[in-house]
Amino acid sequence: MDIKTIELKKTILEDNDKDADLLREQLRQTKTFYVNLMSSPGSGKTTTLVATIKELQSGAPLRIGVMEADIDSDVDAHTIAEQTGAPSVQLHTGGMCHLDAEMSRQGLREIGYEDLDIVFLENVGNLVCPAEFDTGAHMKAVILSVPEGDDKPLKYPLMFEEADVVLVTKIDAMEAFDFAPERFRENLAGVNADAPVFFLSGATGEGVAEWASWLRGEVENFLA
């Protein structure tokens, strides 16, 4: 008897990619720019996001919302709401290590994306699974902290291949770790030579204005 083998992962990814394209078009019609922030746990995603939002709020007003994805807890959503005032929702993934397009759609519906210029998704902390699933975002931003090391583009190539922009955080701790910016740029160029890189510190504020200014330009081009 012949047994049919179904490649489930491939099928699931293909179905999700189609759904993500539909979601991207929906968001384009409402002029809502969607940013997917990805990194490992402890990289400083929330601190960086708070600093970014505050910098964006200091210029011409942008309507900003945040979706915080985690396996459990709502700590990050409370942090964002309390420190920035931006509307924030917590997404629990039910044990899954990533978000897909349908999960994004549910969160976006809850936060009221039609009335927002930009929505940030702080994805589940992981340098593997989130890179495989298209959330429907217009921009994929990868955050790497200095303590993680400058070799991560070599160890997790798909994540960095997918990046539209890379943020290197905790640069105030550079002297305490064997992290060389130029070595990191070389490693990144080996998998993605096009992604711009911003070096910043959410704690001291260094580099945040440059990153936020670049991001504002991307959003304004999208909204035009």
Image (spheres, rainbow, N blue to C red):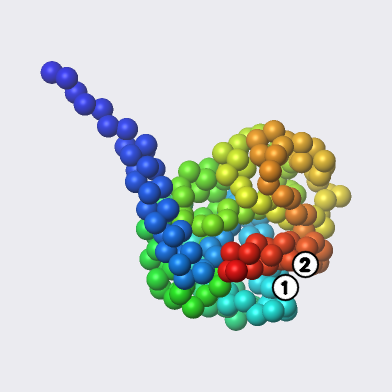
Above or below: residue 175 compared with residue 45: above
48 left or right of 128?
right
Between disc 2 and disc 1, whose residue precedes? 1
Q: Between residue 147 and residue 109, name the one nearer to us.
A: 109
Total count of labels:
2
Residue at position x 39%, y 43% in the image: 13
From the image, which quarter does the C terminus lie in?
bottom right
Q: Amino acid at mark 2?
A: Ala
Q: Between residue 31 and residue 98, name the one nearer to us.
A: 31
Q: Amino acid at mark 1?
A: Glu
Image coordinates of residue 192 in percent, x first then y, are: 66, 39
Query: Is residue 203 something that shows in the picture?
Result: no
Q: Report the residue marked by disc 1.
A: 55
Q: Residue furthest top?
A: 1
Image coordinates of residue 120 in percent, x first then y, are: 56, 65
Residue at position x 39%, y 56% in the image: 22
Disc sitting over residue 209 in the figure: 2
Gap in Å between the C-alphas at discs 2 and 1? 6 Å
Q: Residue furthest left?
A: 1
Image coordinates of residue 62 in percent, x first then y, are: 62, 76
Whether the residues at callouts 2 and 1 have beta carbons within 8 Å, the answer is yes
Q: Residue furthest front?
A: 224
Image coordinates of residue 182 in percent, x first then y, are: 82, 41
SS at mark 2?
A: helix
Residue at position x 55%, y 49% in the image: 126
Query: Is residue 175 something that shows in the picture?
Result: yes
Above or below: residue 183 compared with residue 111: above
SS at mark 1?
A: helix
The picture quadrant where one finds residue 213 is: bottom right
Residue at position x 38%, y 66% in the image: 106
